[in-house]
Amino acid sequence: MTQGASSRPARRSVLGAAVLTTAALGVGAGPAQAGERGGSGRPPGRNLPVPTVIAHRGASGYRPEHTIGSYQLALDMGAHVIEQDLVPTKDGHLVCRHENDITGTTDVAAHPEFASRRTTKSVDGVSLNGWFTEDFTLAELKTLRAKERIPGTRQENTLYDGRWTVPTFEEVLRWAEREGRRRGRPVWLHIETKHPSYFRGLGLGLEEPLAKLLRRYGRHRGNSPVFVQSFEPSSMQRMSRLVSSPCVVLLSGASSRPWDFVEANDPRTVADLVKPEGLKWIASFAQGLGPTLDLVIPKDANGRLTTPTTLVRDAHAEGLILHPYTMRNENTFLPADFRRGTDPNAYGDVFGAYAAYFATGIDGIFTDNPDTGLLAAADFTA
């Protein structure tokens, strides 16, 4: 950890120099140029503090996730970037939900007019029973209200159940424009395409409508205040051909395989992708990684942190930034080293956990609690 901490200022200097070099060369922002430049030629995150604090689904530790209320609170708290997850409606609109299964995040079960739409589907190999966005038009979806996803853990958030609708991504873009004008600085967004292969198979591809909206709102350039991300590398390959917005490949557990790899009979696992050869391949079309925190510092059988991997060093060597996920304040989500007391829903020593992860040299972190993340980042850079 000490070694990672000592290398961090150098990493920031390298990123800054690369950004200045790109600007001085007058690199354009067209989609064709994005493909020509490759991953390492266009460092993202210009003008963002390091470590960057990314509001995971908004301030989801305090408000129901993926609502305008959650996004607004995260921005008011000072989060550097706000995350959206995108899924489509039946009529092709992109809406902000972590999953297309809206059973646990809306009041759809209380709407008798939609009772017959409850169904069982296989999404990326997982059988799910519930209600799904692709079976609703936008007008129908707008009759629902958002609610807290994990009320047992975050009972206080249930106070806001029913206050907000499910936002479209275009509504979020308009909100970001308004807030940017009001604050005199751009509002950064971190946008994920959810289950892109699954939706493409339904004729509801995500990348083309997302690219269209990014172009419409001027967020399609290499220096735009936006990241696009996905757990399916092919989705980011597709996006890199459509827009110049910085692309981030999300990585789950080491033994897992991206679903597009499963469908394509590609035998590689995440463990293969975090090796130098895999990182070089990712850097050919993306500019960043969003690994699970366990890929940065693994845990032992008791849930305690062990020795950091070489992922940060290896990814930086390929010019990739790292935005791992996800920090949350509650004991149940923290490494065992930092849990306090026996109540799984009580807050633990989250500042200690942040310090451990920041010391590895990561460039930013996703968090449900942006205020806590910002304090931890300030402690680290003091």
Image (tube, helix red, strand yellow):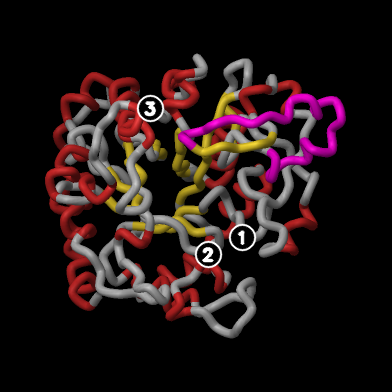
Q: Secondary structure at mark 1?
A: loop
Q: What range of the chain is rendered magenta?
A: 103-125
Give amino acid for label 1: Gly
Mark closest to the chain's N terminus, 3 or 2? 3
Q: Which residue is mark 1?
A: 61
Identify which amino acid the numbered label 3 is placed on. Answer: His
Can you tell which quarter of the image residue 49 is in? bottom left
Quarter of the picture holding the N terminus: bottom left
**Residue 380 appearing in the image:** no
Up the image or down, 350 lies above or below 268; here it is below
In this rendering, position of residue 142 left or right of residue 353: right
- Number of callouts: 3
What residue does disc 2 label? Answer: 328
Q: Residue furthest right?
A: 112
Q: Where residue 192 sits: x, y (%)?
A: 45, 38
Q: Are marks 1 and 3 in contact (CB under 8 Å)?
A: no
Q: In which image quadrant can residue 288 be found?
A: top left
Rate crowding at label 1 as few (under 14), some (14 to 19) or many (20 or more) other CA atoms within 10 Å: many
Name the front one of labels 3 and 2. 2
Which residue is at a point 47% across and 41% down the rendered structure image?
Answer: 189
- Whole-Å distance between the Cαs marked 2 and 1? 7 Å
* Residue 4 point in image, percent of width and height: 21, 70
Residue, x 85% and y 25% (percent of image)? 113
Q: Which residue has dot 3 on it? A: 220
Q: Quadrant of the C terminus?
A: bottom left
193 over 331 or under it: above or below = above
Q: Which residue shows up at 47% across the image and 63% down it?
A: 327
* Three-letter amino acid code at the position of disc 2: Arg
Where residue 182 appears, x then y in whole percent?
Answer: 58, 43
Residue 263 within the segment the image draws in magenta: no
